[in-house]
Image (cartoon, rainbow, N blue to C red):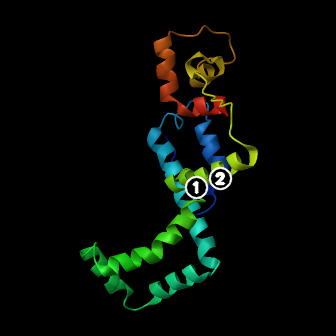
Amino acid sequence: IFPFGLTKEALKKKGAIDVHLRRSWLQFYDRRAAEEIELIFYLFDQSLRHKRNEVVSWQINQKGQREQKFIKLCNDPKFKKMLERAIKYPGGKTAKRIKRIILPLIKITDCKVPWTPLERADTLGKLYSLMHFFNIGTHFITISPCMRHNALAIRLTYTDKAGEEYELPDLKIRTQAITNNPVAATLTFY
């Protein structure tokens, strides 16, 4: 993907890859990054981990009762032995105690991290409150465009056409082109 390597100047900083740099990679004219599924998953995983760290850091800095209890537990000199015992006996009292202290913190922080299961579960409560406030919905609209018939999406999957008119290829070829380039489909949809 990077024939000349990747320098510190290109990355500009430590930590997560900058949003603008990610966008320029994924929208590069020859689609080399847009079709590299491992890179797309890596960038997604990296942004998810950094967001989770940011939310956890914010939550711990709030210094509520749960957070104080967790900090006290982590600073306890016996904590490492407790963890080893909990790993050795996952159904034991020590494991249950640690789980009872940590689980509420996980639930609170993970609700604020996008694309996680707990964020989706937290949305259910918000939907219930909207239903009670606005009443039961009577119209449900789902928007799911078919990208293989969208001329812009097909155009974004090809690099050899420089703004020229062209005919849409066969349906099978269009479907394969969109499948190989999820970035084009996302750009067209959003």
**Where is mark 1, residue-wise?**
122
**Where is mark 2, residue-wise?**
126
- Where 96 sits versus 5, above or below? below
Quarter placement of the C terminus: top right
- Where 126 sits versus 180, above or below? below
Residue at the far right: name it: 134
Mark 1 lies on a secondary structure that is helix
Residues marked 2 and 1 touching at CB (< 8 Å) = yes
Residue 163, picture quadrant = top right
Residue 160, picture quadrant = top right
- For the question of whether residue 53 can be seen, the reply is no
- At x 39% / y 80%, what residue is drawn? 97
- Where 91 sits versus 44, above or below? below
Percent position (x, y) of residue 118?
A: 52, 56
Residue 34, which numbered label?
A: none
Mark 2 lies on a secondary structure that is helix
